[in-house]
Image (tube, rainbow, N blue to C red):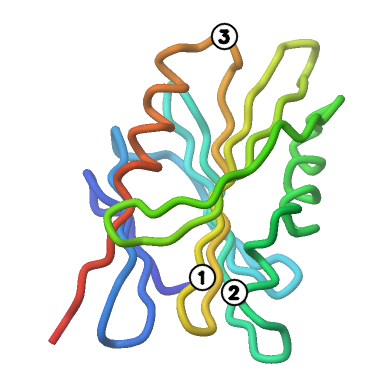
Amino acid sequence: MDWEWKWPEARFYGPPQYELRLKVPDKPAGRDFRDEGWDVEQAVYPKFALDVHETMVFEEAPEDYIQDKPHERVIKTLERYQIKNIQFQGQESLTTNDVPLKKYRFTGTKDGDPFAMEVVAITKENKVWLFTFFYRANSKDGKGQVEDCIDSFYYKHHM
């Protein structure tokens, strides 16, 4: 996968003229792997966890990943984390620092504890990124850190 975690940012590389960046609160502990044609990076922070799924699409339109209903990849990710009672809370389209994105909100439980999940879908040309943030629903710090991360997306352009 074309990315690197250089605290205080995570960098996700696209075509030669740009990279997508995201500010993160700390150096993560995590791992990366390949799953069903997606490159996946998992990062764990004290107040939340983040999964980043990245793929290139050629037969599908990138816009298929930013519809009003979340892509099946998102639901599969939540189920893999054994999130139970998943409830879709809504979605919104927004632009953060010139990065258009679709944000989906979910609630559910894991081991009886309430969890909240924010999923951000971003497409650029034929690249698709799905960022899945998990935090305890009653954690104001977790929610705040996730909101700060989402608000920090931006493109770094190269000449």
Residue 11, labelled with which disc? Answer: none
Determine the CA span between mark 3 and mark 2. 32 Å
Residue 133 on image: x %, y %: 54, 38
Q: Amino acid at mark 1?
A: Thr
From the viewer's perspective, tell me whether residue 158 is left or right of residue 9.
left
Between 101 and 6, the residue placed more toward the observer is 101
Above or below: residue 15 compared with residue 22: below
User: Does 88 appear above or below 16?
Assistant: above
Q: Earlier in the sequence, mark 2 or mark 1?
A: 2
Question: The disc labelled 3 sits on which kind of residue?
Answer: Asn
Q: Where does the image place residue 14, in percent across and percent down from the top left?
A: 38, 78
What is the distance, in whole Å, between disc 1 and disc 3 at their CAs? 31 Å
Element class at badge 3: loop
Looking at the image, tell me whether mark 3 or mark 2 is earlier in sequence order. 2
Helix, strand or loop for disc 2: strand
Question: Hey, what amino acid is under mark 2?
Answer: Thr
Residue picked out by circle 1: 123
Instruction: Please tell me which residue is depicted at 72% across the width and 90% down the height of the picture.
Output: 59
Q: Nearer the viewer, mark 1 or mark 3?
A: 1
Q: Secondary structure at mark 1?
A: strand
**Position of residue 15 measured from the top left corner of the image (x, y, whole percent):** 36, 86
Residue 138, disc: 3
- For label 2, the residue is 55
Q: Residue at x 61, y 77 (%)?
A: 62
Extreme residue toward the left, this view:
159
Mark 1, other Cα within 10 Å: few <14 / some 14–19 / many ≥20: many
- Quadrant in the picture for the C terminus: bottom left
> Residue 95 at x, y = what percent?
39, 54
Q: Residues within 10 Å of mark 3 (few under 14, many from 20)?
A: few
